């Protein structure tokens, strides 16, 4: 009986050792949160990628078609100044309310850069002279104003379907010291122009000024 009891005790004490031996042969692996592989983002079809690109804004309205039916190479020269500020001051004091009066910055070669206060765009010297005499008779312009040689070129700032749009842009430019004028063409089209020039070369300094303001101008016939 005692011998049987000892054998039972020995068997019971050996069970944990066999359990440890079995566990030591089991391969375990701890997976941390940082080691969990991330799922790859779903691939998008090219059409889906295009849908995500923001749509462009509306294209700017195209300028109305201009069919030139007449040309206006003549202008009334009211006065000339070598100082731009003085020219603008004279314009503001005496001629701001006189429609179609504008400022021409012109390169006169050896004489340098001059600023002219000009009025109107006329098809003939006769038409220009009649208008000049009318304004002189009303003491609106000085008696020493004159009709010079043909000045068929101008800087075209824009072409508009309505007069209001051209006048609104002209008002903005006046705040920068640029004083343009509006010329009505056939078909109800209005052009916003700057200056009156005998040739393209004499218009170059004024065009550089407008380019510096971010305006895309072209030298064209009036």
Image: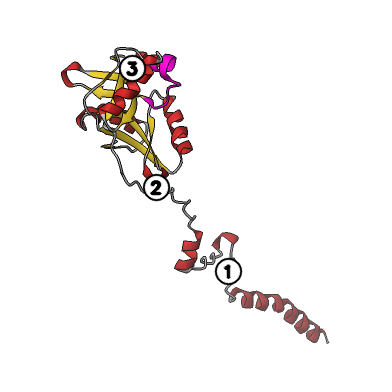
Q: Which one is in front, 42 or 11?
A: 42
In percent of width and height, residue 9 lies at 77, 79
Of pointers 2 and 3, the one earlier in the residue sequence: 2
Measured along the vertical axis of the image, is residue 177 above or below residue 156?
above
Return the residue nearer the eye: 58 or 8: 58
Q: Is residue 124 above or below residue 188?
A: above
Q: Are marks 2 and 3 in contact (CB under 8 Å)?
A: no
How far is mark 2 from mark 3, CA to CA?
33 Å
Which residue sits at x=33%, y=17%?
A: 84
Identify the magenta region: 91-101
Q: Residues within 10 Å of mark 3 (few under 14, many from 20)?
A: some
Residue at x 30% of width, y 40% of height:
70
CA gap, disc 2 and disc 1: 77 Å
The answer to whether residue 175 is above or below residue 218 is above
Q: Quadrant of the N terminus?
A: bottom right
Mark 2, Cα crowd under 10 Å, few <14 / some 14-19 / many 20+, is some
Is 36 left, or right, of 95 in this rendering?
right
Q: Which residue is mark 1?
A: 29
């Amino acid at each position: 009986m005692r011998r049987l009891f000892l054998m039972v005790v020995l068997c019971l004490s050996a069970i944990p050792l066999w359990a440890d031996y079995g566990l030591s042969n089991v391969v375990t692996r701890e997976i941390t949160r940082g080691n969990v592989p991330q799922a790859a983002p779903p691939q998008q079809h090219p059409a889906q990628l295009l849908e995500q690109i923001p749509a462009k804004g509306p294209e700017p309205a195209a300028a109305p078609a201009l069919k030139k039916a007449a040309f206006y190479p003549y202008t009334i020269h009211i006065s000339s100044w070598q100082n731009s500020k003085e020219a603008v001051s004279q314009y503001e004091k005496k001629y701001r309310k006189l429609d179609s009066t504008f400022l021409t910055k012109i390169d006169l070669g050896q004489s340098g850069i001059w600023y002219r206060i000009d009025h109107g765009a006329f098809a003939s010297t006769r038409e220009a002279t009649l208008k000049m005499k009318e304004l002189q008779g009303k003491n609106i312009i000085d008696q020493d104003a004159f009709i010079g040689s043909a000045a068929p070129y101008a800087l075209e700032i824009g072409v508009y379907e309505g007069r209001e749009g051209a006048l609104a842009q002209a008002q903005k430019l006046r705040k920068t010291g640029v004083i343009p004028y509006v010329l009505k063409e056939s078909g109800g089209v209005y052009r916003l122009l700057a200056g009156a020039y005998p040739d393209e070369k004499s218009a170059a300094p004024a065009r550089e000024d407008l380019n510096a303001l971010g305006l895309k101008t072209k030298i064209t016939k009036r």
